[in-house]
Image (spheres, rainbow, N blue to C red):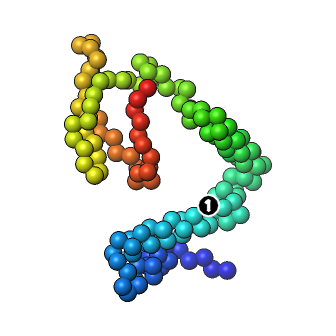
Amino acid sequence: MRIRTGRRGGSRPLTDVPGVADKNAKLHSFAGSQLLEAASPSNYLNTNPELLETTRTESGQNLVRGFKQWVDDLQRTLNRGAPAGSENFRVGEQVAVTPGKVVLRNRTDRTHPVRAADADRLCRAILITPAWIMKYYILDLSP
């Protein structure tokens, strides 16, 4: 069996349909890309050579760890708990909180001015640019 590589070949026919509005063509292209990504051989144990090698080297312990992490995530989700690792961040130690408000909001971003809580603190502006894959998640910086 031959596995074809490359993205263009699979999703392109979804956009080359006569009479389909541009917005719908883009939506179909996005959905097709998502399906192709989900079906990628690297997402499955038996078709991912790197994962197979790691599993062989570790005698399957990587799968055991992954399953335990999945169960932990599931329990935290069902109990409405905080994400794993968030207990390592404490306001005033690893995370800072400062007053602020949104001064500019448009379709793609929001601008928040930052002020130091007191004169002893250094205030440095940062630009947070989440990865495109996180575009559907909310970046919550509140404590």
* View extreme (right): residue: 59
Q: Is residue 89 above or below residue 84?
A: above
The x and y percentages for residue 43 are 62, 61
The quadrant of the picture occupied by the N terminus is: bottom right
Query: Measuring 43% from the left and 26% from the top, which residue is drawn there?
Result: 143
In the visual, does 8 lie left or right of 21?
A: right
Query: Measuring 35% from the left and 71% from the top, which residue is drawn there?
Result: 23
Using the image as rendered, state which of residue 123 and residue 18 is in the foreground.
18
Q: Is residue 74 above or below residue 9?
A: above
Query: Measuring 56% from the left and 35% from the top, which residue is drawn there?
Result: 83
Label tally? 1
Q: Can residue 69 be seen here? A: no
Q: Can residue 128 be seen here? A: yes
Local SS, label 1? helix
The x and y percentages for residue 42 are 60, 62
In the visual, does 104 lie left or right of 138?
A: left
Quarter-of-image position of residue 118: top left
Using the image as rendered, state which of residue 57 and residue 13 is in the foreground.
13
Amino acid at dot 1: Asn
In the visual, does 116 lie left or right of 60?
A: left
Using the image as rendered, state which of residue 48 and residue 66 is in the foreground.
66
* View extreme (left): residue: 103
The x and y percentages for residue 123 are 26, 24
The x and y percentages for residue 87 are 55, 26
Quarter-of-image position of residue 115: top left
Query: Measuring 72% from the left and 52% from the top, which residue is drawn there?
Result: 55
Q: Is residue 138 above or below residue 87?
A: below
Mark 1 surroundings: few (<14), some (14-19) or many (≥20) residues within 10 A: few
Q: Which residue is mark 1?
A: 43
